[in-house]
């Protein structure tokens, strides 16, 4: 799918859903406290780039996902998606025309054939006022999901570009093995993740691939840097395993891949 078709889907979907549903005023603090913004949402990279371009977000506001390419950063302190704006008591991209399609569905979905009373977590009174536009939006959502899944598959295939030998190696060799807790998958590359306290995960890895190391067994905690041999093995390990690991495991809330999870996972 080309980019122009994607933006046609997004913009038409936003227009259709805006016209198809009607409900309470969510920006009224006495009516709503943004509970629906407490849902974690996945988005494609093409949409994330547009949020950055328009000033709604930074690249650090997106973490790697195993569903679409990214997940919107979730603010654990307030229990909401980072796009929630407390000043307007609502989504900062609601009127932008490029709001994530999933966010429009709650609580109405696309149809209400039984004409049931539709309620969100705090308020009733939601209605689908144009069934035809809602059905058309539902069709566009399927196209959107197909695009997102294809893009996510392509992003995983490009994992080797994020595991850049030189930049990642330079990070690895400057970390004491007892301080390496894992890796962080960011916007364009992969960085090292500090361990909380001291970790013995790398001791297992070093034993497997460099058992003749003179300081491994008696002075592991005093080792100041990961050696070239182990750095190479770590990079090769990531190249072999990370894409499949991502497809089968969700990153944690910060997009981190802890060593204890990575080392318990093997791609064949």
Image (cartoon, grey):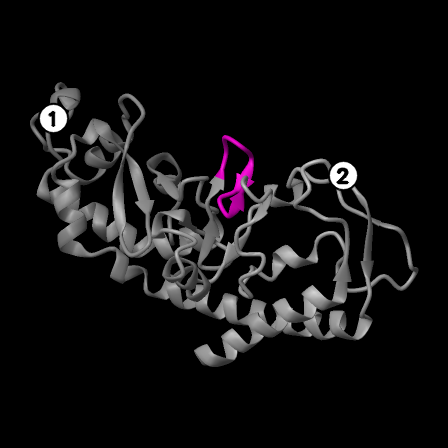
The residue lying toward the viewer, choosing from 31 and 49, is 31
Residue 220 shown left or right of residue 64 in the figure = left
Region rendered in magenta: 75-85
Within-10-Å neighbours for mark 1: few <14, some 14–19, many 20+: some
Residue 88: x and y, percent? 57, 44
Residue 119: x and y, percent? 81, 47
Among the 4 quarters of the image, the one containing residue 244: bottom left
Among the 4 quarters of the image, the one containing residue 103: bottom right
Whether residue 252 appears in magenta in the rendering, the answer is no
| Position of the C terminus by quadrant | bottom left
Separation of marks 1 and 2 at Cα, in angstroms: 56 Å
Q: Which mark is residue 24?
A: none
Q: What residue is disc 1 on? A: 223
Q: What residue is disc 2 on? A: 122
Q: Is residue 71 above or below residue 134?
A: above
Residue 44 shown left or right of residue 196 in the figure = right
Among the 4 quarters of the image, the one containing residue 184: top left
| Label tally | 2
Q: What residue is drawn where x is 9% and y is 43%?
A: 228
**Residue 146 in sight here:** yes
Q: Is residue 55 above or below residue 229?
A: below
Within-10-Å neighbours for mark 2: few <14, some 14–19, many 20+: few
Among numbered discs 1 and 2, the one appearing first in the sequence: 2
């Amino acid at each position: 799918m080309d980019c122009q078709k994607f933006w046609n889907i997004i913009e038409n979907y936003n227009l259709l859903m805006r016209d198809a549903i009607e409900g309470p005023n969510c920006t009224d603090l006495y009516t709503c406290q943004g509970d629906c913004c407490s849902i974690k949402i996945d988005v494609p990279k093409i949409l994330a780039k547009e949020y950055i371009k328009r000033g709604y977000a930074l690249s650090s506001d997106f973490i790697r996902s195993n569903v679409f390419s990214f997940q919107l950063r979730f603010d654990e302190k307030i229990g909401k998606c980072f796009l929630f704006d407390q000043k307007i008591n609502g989504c900062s991209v609601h009127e932008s025309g490029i709001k994530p399609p999933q966010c429009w569905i709650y609580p109405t979905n696309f149809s209400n054939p039984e004409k049931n009373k539709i309620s969100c977590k705090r308020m009733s009174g939601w209605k689908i006022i144009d069934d035809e536009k809602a059905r058309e939006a539902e069709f566009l959502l399927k196209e959107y999901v197909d695009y997102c899944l294809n893009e996510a598959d392509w992003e995983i295939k490009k994992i080797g570009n994020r595991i850049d030998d030189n930049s990642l190696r330079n990070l690895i060799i400057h970390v004491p093995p007892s301080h390496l807790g894992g890796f962080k998958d960011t916007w364009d590359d992969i960085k090292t993740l500090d361990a909380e306290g001291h970790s013995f995960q790398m001791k297992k890895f070093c034993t497997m691939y460099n058992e003749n190391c003179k300081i491994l067994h008696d002075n592991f905690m005093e080792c100041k840097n990961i050696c070239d041999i182990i750095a190479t093995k770590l990079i090769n390990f990531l190249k072999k395993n990370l894409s499949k690991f991502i497809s089968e495991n969700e990153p944690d809330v910060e997009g981190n891949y802890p060593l204890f999870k990575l080392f318990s996972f093997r791609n064949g």
